[in-house]
């Protein structure tokens, strides 16, 4: 893991999350803060000799679902409510 000296970003090699282990793909995740916004960036590398096509990419993402202390009308205005099964 590498933390930017400014403290505004962190980067990590998360290749160990890929299957099969020891395969030709590498994966790095970078989380950065830009003012009041945050971003997540992914870098995929292929160290193998065969061209690969990335067909899909799924990642667990945190969302603001803090309903406590909010009125019913405030929840949809201030919270993210992802629906994985539309």
Image (cartoon, rainbow, N blue to C red):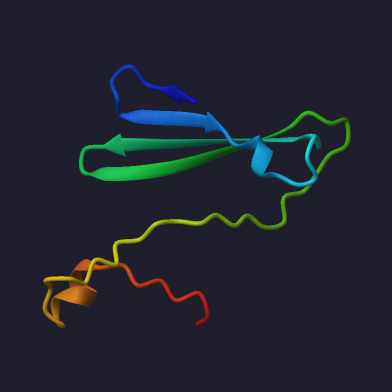
The spot of residue 81 in percent (x, y) is 35, 72
Which quadrant of the structure image shows residue 67? bottom left
Residue drawn at x 84%, y 39% as measured from the top left: 51
Give x and y (percent) for residue 33: 30, 37
Q: Quadrant of residue 52?
A: top right
> Where in the figure is residue 49, as x and y percent of width and height?
88, 30
> Measured along the vertical axis of the image, is residue 6 above or below residue 15?
above
In this rendered view, identify the residue nearer to me: 51 or 10.
10
**Residue drawn at point x = 55 percent, y = 54 percent:** 59
Q: Number of marks in the image?
A: 0
Direction front: furthest residue: 68
Q: Which residue is depicted at the point 39% across and 57% down?
A: 62
Seen in the picture, residue 56 relative to 49 is either above or below; the reply is below
Q: Quadrant of residue 83?
A: bottom left
**Residue 53 as seen in the image, left or right of residue 38:** right
- Tell which residue pokes out farthest to the top in this image: 5
Say whether residue 14 is left or right of residue 76: right
Q: Nearer the viewer, residue 60 or 38?
A: 60
List the single residue furthest toward the right: 50
Q: Looking at the picture, does residue 74 appear above or below residue 24?
A: below
């Amino acid at each position: 893991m590498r933390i930017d000296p400014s403290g505004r970003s962190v980067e990590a090699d998360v290749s160990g999350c890929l299957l099969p282990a020891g395969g030709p793909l590498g994966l790095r995740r970078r989380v950065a803060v830009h003012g009041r916004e945050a971003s997540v960036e992914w870098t995929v590398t292929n160290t193998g000799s065969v061209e690969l096509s990335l067909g899909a990419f799924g990642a667990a993402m945190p969302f603001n679902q803090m309903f406590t202390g909010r009125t019913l009308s405030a929840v949809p205005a201030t919270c993210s409510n992802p629906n994985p099964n539309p």
